[in-house]
Amino acid sequence: MTTSPPAYDRPKRFYKDVSVEPAEGGGWQILLDGRSIKTPGRALLRLPTEALAQELAEEWA
């Protein structure tokens, strides 16, 4: 019987390109491989400051 490895043994997803840019309608957005991050409700994740967006983007870099 085969089982999948525990979550902590699985490789994490890595992104080749992580960037921050102004969001349409104000705020800042993070792009992962050119795609905007969305919330679970599928809304664009907008951050109020560039500094906050940069800090969060570093988590995926």
Image (cartoon, rainbow, N blue to C red):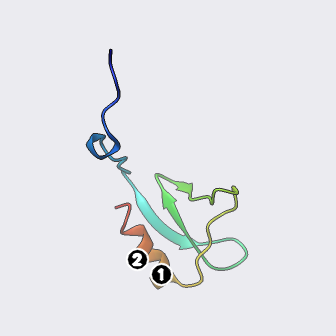
Which quarter of the figure has residue 19?
bottom left
Q: Position of residue 16 (x, y in %)?
A: 36, 51
In the picture, the quarter occupied by the C terminus is bottom left
* 5 sits left or right of 49 in the view: left
Type of the residue with mark 1? Leu
Q: Amino acid at mark 2?
A: Glu
Q: Nearer the viewer, residue 31 or 47?
A: 47
Q: Residue furthest top?
A: 1
Residue located at (37% from left, 66% from top): 59
User: Which residue is denoted by mark 2 in the rendering?
Assistant: 55
Q: Secondary structure at mark 1?
A: helix
Give x and y (percent) for residue 7: 34, 43
Q: Nearer the viewer, residue 9 or 43?
A: 9
Which quadrant does the N terminus fall into? top left
Element class at badge 2: helix
Q: Relative to 55, does residue 16 appear above or below in the rendering?
A: above
Q: Is residue 45 above or below residue 35?
A: below
Q: Quadrant of residue 37?
A: bottom right
Report the front residue among 17 and 11: 11
Residue 52 shows which numbered tag? 1
In this rendering, position of residue 36 left or right of residue 8: right
Q: Indicate left or right for 7 with 27 as reference.
A: left
Q: Which residue is drawn at the image coordinates 37% and 47% (left, top)?
A: 13
Instruction: Tell me whether circle 1 and circle 2 mark residues in contact (CB < 8 Å).
Output: yes
Cα distance, mark 1 to mark 2? 5 Å
Give the total number of marks visible in the rendering: 2
